[in-house]
Image (tube, rainbow, N blue to C red):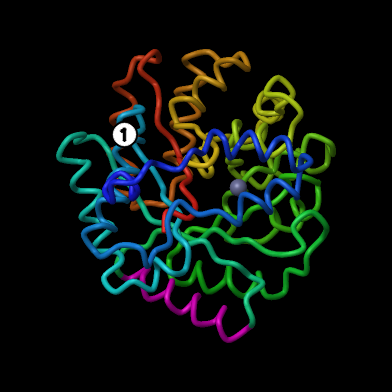
Amino acid sequence: MLASRAGREPYDWSAWRGDLLAEAPPGMARLQRLSQVFPAPASADDDEGFVDRVADTLLESAAAGSVFTEVRFGNESMLRPGFMELFRRAEQRVRDEYPVFYAEAIASVLLWYEPDRLAAVVDECVRAATEGLAGMDLLYVPYATEANWRVGRQVVDRAVDAGLGVTVHAGEFSTANIGAVAHLDGVTRIGHATQAFRDPWLLDVLAEREVTVECCLSCNVLLGAVPRLADHPLRRFRAHGIKVALGTDNPVQIGTTIGDEYAAAAQLGLSDAELLELTRTAVRAGFTSEDRRAELLGHLDGFEPEGAMGGVTREQRVG
Ligand SMILES: [Zn+2]
């Protein structure tokens, strides 16, 4: 998007994905590579450019049929003056074209920052919450082995006090941290949790704690969390009474849209009615106001199942 405005060739993410598969083994090595690339640095554009870029992202999601999209932002974007106002301008531009569409902003928070920087980022999120920031996504190290949740616990408490929703990455490549995270009061969603299928106790915990699992099918296949789409545990999760919503994770790099993710879920055998249920779950678990949630659920009640789409799309590192 940025490249097209600057008159340059768009970056070839499909070639990048080919290299990723050829050069990095499945699992953490691929995630590390993914985390090193960004569509564009936040400093690369002025306010208008930023609004354009966010609106492009939201427009792609709305055009794919989404009625509710959450976009995840890195800390650099959060610190941009007037961040939430710019985000709402981008959202409004999309709503002019798609009146039944809402978007919310989520901050990605890296718990491994040194304490002063982490405190500053959390302060900024708490302040932005008063302007409409909807939630936080927590990331930490070690990711694939058990982490210490002392600092995470404090950050979750501050977020909840500020009225922010909290989702945490866990269980993408190992069962580590799923149990700990699911037991943190205030955490209502877990990103991925793919490996929970390996442990019946973890499945019980996710169901009993009513944690919504954000399944990002294409991302899980590309990074090797599952060998093939057919191996994805989404249906097992649902059969166990676990709430499931769909997401795109990093759609630009992964080369997916929320529409593609619903198509992948259909490939796993979900019926149109079940796909619509995923959308309802996404809206119920979405980080948004109760007014917006009620409006969206009312809209979905009028949907025929074959028109079902939408959900929590996750666009990490939009800037
Ligand atoms: Zn992820």
Task: Give the residues drawn in magenta, as a range.
Answer: 115-130
Element type at mark 1: helix
Q: Residue furthest front?
A: 8
Question: Which residue is nearer to you in this view: 77 or 311?
Answer: 77
Q: Left or right of 90: which side holds 261?
A: right
Decide whether residue 281 is among the magenta residues. no
**Residue for point 39% across, 66% down:** 77
Q: Left or right of 162: which side holds 221?
A: right
Decide whether the magenta segment is chiefly helix, strand or loop.
helix
- Relative to 73, residue 80 above or below: below
Decide whether residue 119 is among the magenta residues. yes
Q: How many marks?
A: 1
Percent x, y for residue 47? Answer: 24, 64
Percent x, y for residue 182? Answer: 69, 53
**Residue for point 33% across, 53% down:** 289
Q: Which residue lies furthest to the bottom in this view?
A: 116
Percent x, y for residue 250? Answer: 52, 44
Q: Residue furthest left?
A: 96
